[in-house]
Amino acid sequence: MRAIASMLRSGVRPLTLTGLLAATSLFDFATAVSFTPAPSPNLDLSQLGRVALAGDFDALSIYEYEGQNRNSFSTNGSQSLLTQYPNGAFANLAMADAYILTMCPFTFSNGTFAGVVVGGNFTSLGGVEAQGIALFNPDNGQVTPLAGLSGKVAAVFCDGEANTLYVGGSFSGGNSTNAISWNGNWANMPFAGFNGPVTSITKAPNGNIIFGGSFDGLGNTTTPRKRDVQVIPLSSGQISATSSSTTQGFSDPKNIICKTSAQSGPGNSWLLSDGAQGSWTARFAFGFVPTKLRLYNTQQDGRGTRTFQFQELNNGGILELEYPDPATGILRTCEQWCPLPQNNGSAQDFRFTRPGVGMNSFRININGYYGSGGGLSGIELLQDDIYAYSINDFNEPVCDDVSTTGAHATSTGPWARTPSGQSNADYLSATLQGSPVDPASASVVFQPDIQQSGNYSISIYTPGCVPDNTCLTRGRVNITGTVSNGSPTSGPPISALLYETNNFDKYDQIYFGYVDASSDSFKPSITLSPAAGQNGPLTIVAQRVRFELLNSTGGLNGLFEFNPNEATIDTDFSKSRINTAGTELDSGAVVNVLQTVGDNLFVAGNFSTSDFANIFSIGGARATGLPGNGLNSQVQTVYLFNGTQLFLGGNFSNTRGNTTEGLNYVALFDTTNNAWHPLGAGVNGVVTDLVPVSLNLTGDQPEQCIALNGNFNQVLSFGNNPPFAVQGLAIWVPSRTNWLHNLDVASIALQGHLSTATDVNGFPPILAGSILSQALGVADAAGLTTSGPLALLQLPVRIQPTQVSSSSNLQKRAINNQNTTGAVTGLIYSENNLNITILGGHFTARASDGSEINNLVFVNGSNSDQVVGVGQELDESVFLALGTTGTMLFAGGTLSGEVEGNNVTGLIVYDLVRAAYGNQPPALQGPSVAVNAIAPRPSAADVYVGGSFDSAGSFECSSLCVYDTSRSQWNVPGSGLGGSVAAMAWTDNDHLVVAGNLTTNGTATSMIMYNVLDRSFTSMNGASNLPGPITTLSTANAEGSMFWVAGTDGSDTAYLQKYNGTAFIPVAGDALGQGTVIRGLQILTLSDDHDNSDLVPAGEALLVLGQLQLPNFGSAAAALFNGTAFNPFLLSSSSSSQDGVGSLSAAFVQNPNNFFKGGGRNMAAGFVVLIALAIALAITFIVVVLGVIAERIRRKREGYIPITHKMYDKHNNMSRIPPEHLFRDMGQGPSMGRL
């Protein structure tokens, strides 16, 4: 069996088709991705009755498979390849550092599986550097980058029949832009890509390849009408020279930067020493691709350079140059030595013949000269690329007539220059503080020098976080921009939100459209600043912005049909009905999705005609609108279900003709009956992705559902189904025509975003996204099975956790370390013919009558699981402790209010029989009252209440008071106790263990023993030396002489120790990671022994609850400690926590007195007696038999001879002793005198 760990290994291998085919043939692709089961917890819960859990979570899972903790949930823009465990939860296969947008399985025509092609805007996948595209092998987890592209891949289509992969997006590679093919190596198609982004690729029924996107022609970036428009700022480089003249004013090689021959003379020219060869060198902290070199020869004293060569120093190559012969004007080329004319009053231009050679340093080597020696009066290096850098030294200077305005950047905030590392150029970094960070605290405004209006692609470059070690603090930036001076052809303002969490360098296209040229009154600008809603420390970076002028052959409008069997492109696009369908759309069409259904091609996006809008089909000679003339706004995503049903998502609300209500941002179009159908009533925001997921809703038969993802927070009401809140993710169940949330079924919980999915033969489906998932979607309370396979159960109550505002008075005292949202505590009451599950905390639940109830909930199993609560007078409270005596429930916490005319603080009493408030004790008093523990005394009427308070009614009893239910009055337990009580436990009827942040007679301690009989408090040995106050405790043995305790030290580090009756024994400090919070402890019995240890007996395990950080594992809500190691037991998630991780606070059971009784280890008394009797009888029989045998042997040895028997008349002597005389005294005791 292949473990999940094997799928996380990554590597790089050759990219040739032959090598790929050979490599893939080594693997057994019939074997699906499999998972190694985790060791069984071996719990024996059979004696505990019902078992329930309370905490702050949205979902729970039992840890069943290795790697199950590696959820892919992320809020920093990164996503992962995913698959599903057998229990339905999601497994992380390989993590990317950004979005995964598209996938397809690539199987060659000979049946060999190459892998899953993964595309997106990532720069790494599975720890391997991969720029936007890679192959993933689901059999062994190997990632193979398809190197050669730069940019974002938005669409892939695997054409196995042709052994060709088609790739589209917003990228450059080879000689193509935005579209390219791969067949073992990158191959340019007969056209040079498109002049705009490609968003979808599919294969038409006739075998042609269809491209959809936002383009209006074939082609690449164009050569500008004004070439060489940007001057490279040579002054920002490190300039040096060899063999420089020693003549004053002519030795500095910087003299010639941004100068002309008209400015010759001292300080304006650089000369070589007489008769010497030499060189002029420039090195820069940024890269560039020069297109032209301009040199001004010196005229100083008849000197000058006769011949030179240009050497780029990154690879050491000599570059060939092209120049016009000054005498004839004929273009000539030179490589080894290029000439400069003597006494030339103007510049001599040299164009680089080899395009696209990038560099960050170069050298001018001079070997021939005029007069006494060589020299130069001016040098300029120019490029076609238009950049604006955040560091102004790298921006275009103002030199002669080439650059009249220059590029510029303005920065505000705590920016610092950061070395380029592996990037193209140095850049600015800023580390920002605040919760949240102020979006106005830092910004960079880029202003390029645009000399030619036209259609541009604007991209922003982001250095990777790995080289500068800022991955943990990178976040999001907001990009805004203005590219228009108000002209009719101008595009809209730019607004984009980008993640800067990429591991390696990337660029994002932020705009595609028309840009006005710079002028005295207008200059295009791009602004980068931190996005809102982020907490510090936050690192943002700013490097450069690029403007690319685009070319177009024209004639297209978002659609292009390509025949792969033709070597050339027929530019008469009207011959294709698909191309024609595009040109019939209004100009500027954006095609987002292409989907074939049978012989029809469905086209969806953002476009319109007079007849239809945003979606149409091509099946006959021309485009055909759908019923209702299409949809009234953009379609962003389409998923084909069951081969005939199209699920669509976008920002529409109805058909264009308003013929179908309920199509709010999502719709179903059935191709069999040509009709629209709503999904309930839809959602309240844009749907961006539709992804199939497999869910187990009934038994063990999973069915396919549809996951909606997007910018919405509510699913709208329809029929008898009320609206419900979501966080950008909702599940539609086609077989039930309803949302998963509305179905009364236990199912997995999903939180996050799914972006795409693909089916792979021989493997489970592979999905992509950022997901936090657990096996059971249930909030704050759940049950555990106590017989059969261990499983989670959904309790018959629906809870929705609520947030505690910072201004409210709901924070519990620091001593108890409990969460103050969700369910904090629970109790199962099963006496007096009642069966009631009670939950307390801070949450909102739904009562059986449909009303909302808060913080204290009763599930009455003796009345058809009726759910009720207390009144609204305690809505702003947190219940932290529960206890019962008789039929009265004592519920405590941080609560205050008025109950039936009585002021209550910290504690209320509730009558479980009447389902109503009971007689309330006098209120507790103190500056910040909190009841943290309630311990009714066994076999008595006293209820001990512990927490943070000064008095109860008129009695001064700091931290611990006793309520006598028989007299309805408070009593003082004794004197000398102070501090705050966090937990209590009875060892017998007369001794109570009290723990917390305590003092006894002024001496600090964390744990004391209270003796009821003499009303004394005694600090337990070693309790004053614990690392910090105890926040929770649990009995460690049946006799009540040992205890487990937990708390935190002064540095908020959790500790766990056992009191063995005489001293505290600590668990190793590194057993739990930093950030661990322990909220509950409980000993449980096991069905199978573990190795014995000094801390935990072989037949038991310690259940540790809270928010645990387990080394080499990660987060867990519960773990089982066997005395030597913590084994993960329960995993949880919560949408209300920043990291998405939930927690558990308590485990409570129906029979708490049976915690130390294992069903497989303790037999009923009757069976014990019977077995003992049987054993005794067997032993007696064996002894008698052995005795008889031994006697016979003895007699035989002694010569024993049997007597010859004489037969007598058996009735002969009966008359001598009558029977009544023989038995008349039986049953009569001896005659005794009276006492």
Image (cartoon, rainbow, N blue to C red):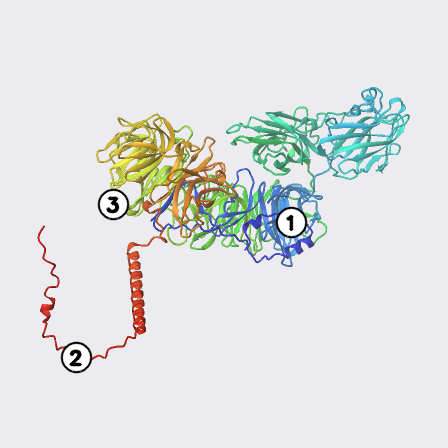
Q: Are marks 2 and 1 in contact (CB under 8 Å)?
A: no
Occupied quadrant, residue 523 = top right
Residue bearing the label numbered 1 = 166
**Res 529 visible:** yes
Q: How crowded is mark 3: few (under 14 residues within 10 Å), some or many (20 or more)?
A: few
Q: Which amino acid does label 3 sit on?
A: Asn
Residue that protrudes farthest toward the front in the picture: 1198
Residue at the spot 74% in from the left edge and 26% down from the top edge: 235
Q: Label 1's element?
A: strand
CA gap, disc 1 and disc 3: 73 Å
Q: In this view, does 1178 lie above or below 728?
A: below
Q: Is mark 2 on a helix, strand or loop?
A: loop
Seen from the viewer's position, the closer of residues 1012 and 90 is 1012
Give the amino acid type for the residue marked by disc 2 in the picture.
Tyr
Query: Which mark is first along the chain, 3 or 1?
Result: 1
**Position of residue 890 measured from the top left corner of the image (x, y, whole percent):** 29, 36
Tell me the CA gap for discs 2 and 1: 118 Å
Residue linked to disc 3: 832
Which badge, 2 or 3, comes first in the chain's sequence?
Answer: 3
- Quadrant where the N terminus sits is bottom right
Percent position of residue 1208, x then y: 16, 79
Quarter-wise, where is residue 1016 in the image? top left
How far apart in space, not on screen, are marks 2 and 3 (Cα)? 73 Å
Q: Which residue was labeled with disc 2?
A: 1208
